[in-house]
Image (cartoon, coloured by chain):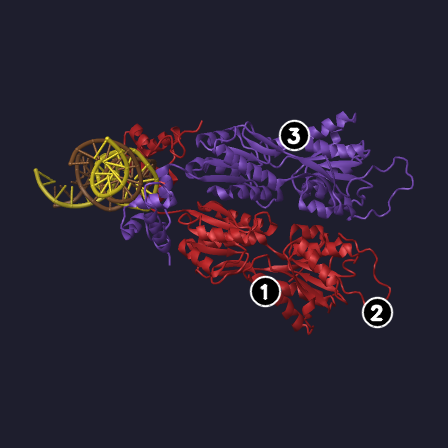
Chain colours: A purple, B red, C yellow, D brown
Amino acid sequence: MRSMPGRPAVNMKDLAREAGVSVASVSRALSDAPGVSSSTRRRIKELAASMSYTVSPDASRLKRGSRNRVAVVVRDIAHWAYSSMLQGIMGSLRNADLDVLLYQVRTEQERRRFFEQLPARRQVDAVIVIAFPISDEERQCLELMDAAVVIAGGRLGDYPSVHIDDVAAAQQATNHLILAGHERIGMINAGGDWSLPYSQPADRLHGFTTAMEAAGLSVIPELIVEAPWGRTGGAEGMNRLLSIAPPPTAVFAFSDEVAIGALRSLRRAAVTVPSGMSVVGIDDHPMAELSDLTTVHQAAEGQGARAGQLLLDILGDNAAPGTQITTPTHLVVRGTTAPPRPKRPQPADDSPRHIYASTEIDRKWG
Amino acid sequence: MRSMPGRPAVNMKDLAREAGVSVASVSRALSDAPGVSSSTRRRIKELAASMSYTVSPDASRLKRGSRNRVAVVVRDIAHWAYSSMLQGIMGSLRNADLDVLLYQVRTEQERRRFFEQLPARRQVDAVIVIAFPISDEERQCLELMDAAVVIAGGRLGDYPSVHIDDVAAAQQATNHLILAGHERIGMINAGGDWSLPYSQPADRLHGFTTAMEAAGLSVIPELIVEAPWGRTGGAEGMNRLLSIAPPPTAVFAFSDEVAIGALRSLRRAAVTVPSGMSVVGIDDHPMAELSDLTTVHQAAEGQGARAGQLLLDILGDNAAPGTQITTPTHLVVRGTTAPPRPKRPQPADDSPRHIYASTEIDRKWG
DNA sequence: ACGTCGTACGTAAACGATTACGCCACAGCA
DNA sequence: TGCTGTGGCGTAATCGTTTACGTACGACGT
C-alpha cells in the first residue's frame, strides 16, 4: 500500500519531535554539519535509521539551490559503442552523488523535442551528449539552462569532449591496406542519418584521402561510396563497389558494423576474403573478433569513463572548460586483410588460411 | 558563465512583477489551471517565453508531492539483452512525461550499496529492475521507497514482471536437438555470478531435464556443467564436456554468449560443427547470426517495451499489481545443429555445408 | 433597489528542508 | 566577582511553487 504520492511517511519535524530536539539540530546532525554534540548526533542518526527516515531530496535541493543531476543523452542505447560509453560514464559518476537522467533521441524529431523540453522540466548541472550532432539553436537551449556540456565519442564546436582522432584512425586503417600493397582502395562512408553535419564521417574520409595521397596513390572518387549507417548499409555500399569495373582490391569501412555488412555482400558475391578483397573497419566491436575482422580499436567504455571524469572536473572547476581529450586507437590485424592478388594470375595462395588463427594473437600496430 | 548553481536567473516572482499580476496568476496561467482570463494567460505565457523562464521542478515537486520519475536499475548496461530492454523501456516511457533515473549495479557490492542507500529514495514513482535477483532484505528496502516495482527480463516474487517462459525456451532448444536424433545431450548452465538464486538458470535446467525425460532420454548429471556467464565461461564449460568420455553429441547452452564461447572451444579442439557436435543457445543475440548459431529467439527490446507499458498501466491503476506477462519465444534454426554422426562410421556427410546458407532463410519453429 | 452568483484575481499558508542569528550555560581568566 | 569566549541548541526566515480562501466586481433575476 502506497501512501500519498511523494509525501514521506515521516518528515524532519516528526523526527525532531520524537528526538526531543529542533529540526535545525536534526538537519545539522544528519548532514554532518558542526553545531551538534556528538552524542545527540549519534542519537538522532540512530533514530532516523530506526524510523527509516531520509531527507527529501527535493526540499533539500530547493533550499540549497544545488541540483546534483546530470542528463545523458544518447542516440541509440542498444548500440554497442554507445552503451559501452554509457557504462563508462556511469562508472566514473558512481561515487559522485549525482543522479543520472537518461534520454534517448533516436530520430531528428526526438532530438528536437528533447532540446525544446530540456530547459522546461529538467534541471541539471550538466549534459553529456553521446556521439551525435546538435544544431545551433539547440546549443542555445543548452546555454540557457546554464549547464555544463560534455561530448563523449565525438567533437562539437568548442564543447569539452572525449573522442578518438578520427583522422588518425582512418589513416591507421588505410595505411595498413597500403602497406599490404593495395593501390586501388575504396571506402564505404556512413553519415549516420542525421541531417546535421557531424565531424566523424568527414574526418574519416579526410584521414583516408590524406593517407592515400601521402602514399602517392590516387583517390578515385567513384570508389568512395556513401551508405546508411549499419550492416545493411555496409552491404549496399559493398555491392555498389563490386559493380565498378575494376572493383577495388581493398575497402576501408566507416565502422565495424559497416564492414561486417560489407563482408556479407562479399560472401554472397562469392568473393573470397582476404585473397579477393581486403576489408578493414573501425571500432573493434565484439563482433569484429567473431568475424575475424581487421579493425582499428577504440576503447568505447574508456572514452565514457574519461568523459564522466572530465565532467566531474569541470563541475569541480578542476578542468578548463574547453578541454579536449583524445584517446588512442590502434590497429588490430585479423583475417580480413592481406596483400592483393598479384595482377598476373599465378598460382594463387588460396590455401585455407585458418580463419581463427589470428584471434589468438592480436598483433597490434601503432 | 554560470550564475549561482541551481538558482534560476528569473523566478516566478520576477515574472509576476514584470507582468503586473500576482504569482498565483502566473502559476495558474502556466499550468493551464482555471481562474485566469485567456487574455492574461496568453500574455503571461508570452512573457515567460521571452524571459526564457521555466518553473523550478524541485519547488513544484515539493509543493505538489508528485515525482514523475522512474528509476531503472540494470546490471550491465553494455550487455546486448539489457541495453535492448532499456531501449524498449525508454521507448514506451517516452511520451509519458516521466524522467528516467538510471542506476547500474554490476557487482554484489554495488547492488548492496544501491539498496542500502536507496539513492532513488523519495525521488521516483517506480523502479524497473532489469534482470537480476534481489534478496529478501533488499525487497524490504524497496518497500521503503514506496514505489511501484516492475521486473523486466525475469521473475521475482510477486512483483509484476515481463519475461520469457524460460522452461519452455529450454524445452524448445532441447527438443530441437532431440528431434534431430541426439540422445547424449549436455548442457552448459550459467548462474550469473550472483550469490543469490535467480529463476533463470533453474528454469532453463528444468526445461532441459523435462524435455529429456519426456522423450524418454536419461539426464546424465555429469553432462550438466555450470560455468560462469559469458563467452569465456562457455568455452570453459565446453572444455569440461569435451573431456568426458564419450562426450555428448549435442549441447544446449544457457545463452548465446555461452554458446559462442563453446563454439570457440570446439574450433580449438578441432571438433567440426555441426557434424561432430551440435550447439544451441538462447537469446538470438545479433552475434548468433554471425556465428550461424541455432538459437531460441527472445525479443529483448519488446520485453522492455512491455515492461514500460506495464509500469504505466500500474501507475495509472489500469493493471493488477501482480500482473505477469510472458512474451513468446521461437526456435531459429541455423547452422550449428544437425543430426548426430551415425554411430557406425560410414561415409560421413562432410561435404561443406555452406555455413551461411541458413542465415538467408530462418526457418522458425514454434 | 437588493441578494446571488460566477469569474478574475490577490493574499497567504503550506511543502520539507537549510542556515543566519540569537540565546543560554558554562568554562576560563583576571 | 565580573567579563568574555565558545559550544550546543532553538527560532525563524527562506528557497520557488501551488492552492485554499477571500475579495471585488459585473451580470442577472426579482
Residue type, numbered disc 3: Ala
Q: Which corner quadrant of the image does residue B298 belong to?
A: bottom right
Give how far across and how far down residue A20 sits, in percent.
27, 50
- Same subunit: marks 3 and 1: no
- In-image side of A311 versus B353 (left or right): left
Q: Earlier in the sequence, mark 1 or mark 2?
A: 1
Chain letter for mark 3: A
Instruction: Establish if B125 lies above or below A212.
Output: below
Instruction: Establish if A59 lies above or below B199.
Output: above
The residue labelled by disc 2 is B344
Select label 3 or label 2 by which is in front.
Answer: 2
Chain letter for mark 2: B
Select label 3 or label 1 by which is in front.
Answer: 1
Residue density around tag 3, few if under 14, some if 14–19, many if 20 or more, within 10 Å: some
The residue labelled by disc 3 is A202
Q: Residue at x 36, y 33 (%)?
A: B45
Image quadrant holding the C terminus of chain B, namely bottom right
User: Residue reaching furthest bottom?
Assistant: B216
Give how far across and how far down residue B327 sits, in percent.
56, 59
- Same subunit: marks 1 and 2: yes
Tell me the distance, in whole angstroms, between the alpha carbons under discs 1 and 2. Answer: 36 Å
- In-image side of B321 versus A107 (left or right): left
Tell me the distance, in whole angstroms, between the alpha carbons under discs 3 and 1. Answer: 50 Å
Is residue B254 visible to us here?
A: yes
The residue labelled by disc 1 is B203
Give how far across and how far down residue A275 sits, in percent.
83, 41
Q: Secondary structure at mark 1?
A: helix
Q: Which corner quadrant of the image does residue B173 belong to?
A: bottom right
Residue type, numbered disc 1: Asp
Contact check, label 1 and label 2, Cβ < 8 Å: no
**Which of the pair A25/B248 is nearer the observer?**
A25
Residue density around tag 1, few if under 14, some if 14–19, many if 20 or more, within 10 Å: some
